[in-house]
Amino acid sequence: MIPRSLQIAIALLLLVALGMGLYLLGLKRREEQRARAALDNRPVSAPVAGSPSHVVLFVADDAQGVLRQRDASIALPAEPAQRAHEILHALLGEYTKRPSTHELAAGADVQEVFVLNNGIAVVDMTAPFADAHRSGIFVETLTVASLVETLAANVPGVTRVKILVEGKERETLAGHADLTTFYDVSSVDQLVKQLP
Amino acid sequence: MRSSRRARARGLAPLLPGFCLLLLLTNAPSAEEKQIAIFAPQVSYTLPVVQRSGQDYVGLLEALEPLGAVSAKTEGRKWKLRFRDREAEFHEGKHEGRVRGRKVELGSRLLLENNRGLLPLRALPALIGRFLDLPVEFHEPGRRLFVGDAGTHFTAELHENALALNFSAPVNPTVSTEPGKLQMVFIRDPMRAAVQTLHFNSPLVSAVSLTEDNGRAALTVYGPVPLLATFANGGRTINLVAAPSQAAQAPPPQPPAQAAGTPPAGASAQAPPAPVVPALPGKPPFMVMVDASHGGEESGAVLADKLLEKDVTLGLARRLRLELLNRGIVTAMSRDSDLTLTAEQRAAMANSSRVAVFITVHAASQGTGVRLYTSLLPPAETPPGPFLPWDTAQSAFLGASRVVTDAIKSELDKREVPARELMAAVRPLNNIAAVAIAVEVAPASADLGSLTANNYQQAIASAVAEAVAATRGRVEAAL
């Protein structure tokens, strides 16, 4: 007759061995996936092809409290949504480089842009764009106005812009600028006129 | 084996609806949160009441904050508090503490949660009295606490076809009607009465009763006919008349009836009746709501190491309220302590109170001077109807909002405070059915400390209040 205490000890040891085995199996699978991903050299998105085009960027300047119109030349694809994506990517590049007139955190970028037939453009931003944005009505409004004006200036027919973050609607950008609303391009034009 | 498992599952099946019901009940919205209302001579505010070990507790720091400068620090299990120049010391878990060197009984143990001292609710009146050196009256069942001579009294006068309720200060209740009664709920007004119910022998009104519950006072008027409440005399008088459809059927005028009950506290038989100015039905008194943005869990911008936007906005909002009150303008605040409020709650508060002007106060570390914002919505092309869409309610009032911002800028210019007028999509401006402005205060100079400087904040508060007073007539005409 095996003593009861020994039975319990053996059962516990078996359980531990089973747990360790499962853990090792998980580790092995994870490592295999990582190795496969490292070997995968396929591009995540199609490379931008096309001749350099002239675009207009509305770049925010915190110190002067204005949006400055700046001409740029960038390679653009033919498809409107991809063009809009590249233009906004260039604009955000102005803000993530150092020094910048309107600093945004590293990683602040545009994920996707959808241009709909009814004049609505939906811009999906990365999480750092909103998560690390400085808080304040003015500074947040400058960011939003810069995005909306740049889109409207370069993508004909855009009349309203909706900003999402990581594919989801947010209440505000960083506590102030309303992101639940659609930004009307004509209203933002009026706002920009108020900035000297 | 398998069949026995199935049998067991079948046995559990009848329990499933019960389990689902339990799940639904546990996820159902909780009952209204408990709160206490504190009415001091200069300020009225509410605080959440929390339950610990079956007892009501309240944050002492939050209770004292609106009454003056207060700070606290924790040293181990010791909690030290300084209110103005008065010191107090408490120990976590102890039933007593010391305030200004004297022992005070708390009735139950003091709790420390996240360096916040939670005090048994019953001990609050004695402690506030000790800190302020003022008499304190606590209406425990209704959780309403009156400090010093704070209190609005009323008298009831029965006229031929109306009951006039005259208040000692402007009031702003939420009015609702049900068959057989009209109820006025006072949230921020320190309504008090020694006698709870007045009886009348009138075809219009049979009784007026004051009740208190969860920090609020409710004045209920009972009568056989539907009643209509109209405000007059700058919010100091509420006239109750038969609703229009009933007025034609109302009995012929009779001599004024004698109130059968004892007059309420503050009633003065000798004093002449307060003047009753006829008011347009439904036209509310001119009232401003000052909204200290952010608050509670939502601190807004971190302006400096220990300077949060929510604290700066609350200080500035209180200053602005005082300036408005000094100019005879009825003023309410959306929050008067460190409370979390959503944009929707702020808008609902303003719209249900039917304010004429809503001013939301913000603070920022970028730039200098004051930025005045109106909504980014396009102006309405047609006059507003009786119902307004929630998302674009402000459209109809944009013209009036810009009149007031122009006036504020002009007043700020006079005081040599740099100011800009802009548009922005800031919540809840779009949802306000009245004049709505956001005031964002940035430092006066490159020095961030100027943001909280007394003379700077005072100049801004007085400029805003002066502009609101100056444009009052135009705003009233526009609304």
Image: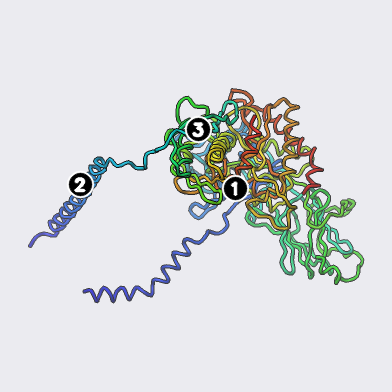
In screen coordinates, is A117 left or right of B382? left
Q: Quadrant of the C terminus of chain A?
A: top right
What separation in Å lies between label 2 and label 1 (alpha carbons)? 50 Å
- In this orientation, does residue A183 appear? yes
**In the image: residue B260, left or right of residue B28:** right
* Residue at the image point whose x is 48% and y is 47% from the top: A114
**Going 91% across and 70% down the picture, which residue do you hit?**
B252
Graded by Cα atoms within 10 Å as few (under 14), some (14 to 19) or many (20 or more), the crowding at tag 2 reads few
Vertical position of residue A15 compared to residue B292: above or below: below
Measure how far apart labels 2 and 3 are at the Cα level.
51 Å
Q: Which residue is mark 2?
A: A28
Q: Label 1 is found on which chain of the structure? A: B
The chain under label 2 reads A
Name the residue tied to disc 1: B343
Q: CA distance from mark 1 to mark 3?
A: 42 Å
N-terminal of the pair, mark 2 or mark 3, is 2
Question: Dot 3 corresponds to which residue?
Answer: A54
- Give coordinates of residue B183: x percent, y percent: 72, 61
Q: Do the residues indicated by labels 2 and 3 lie within the same chain of the protein?
A: yes
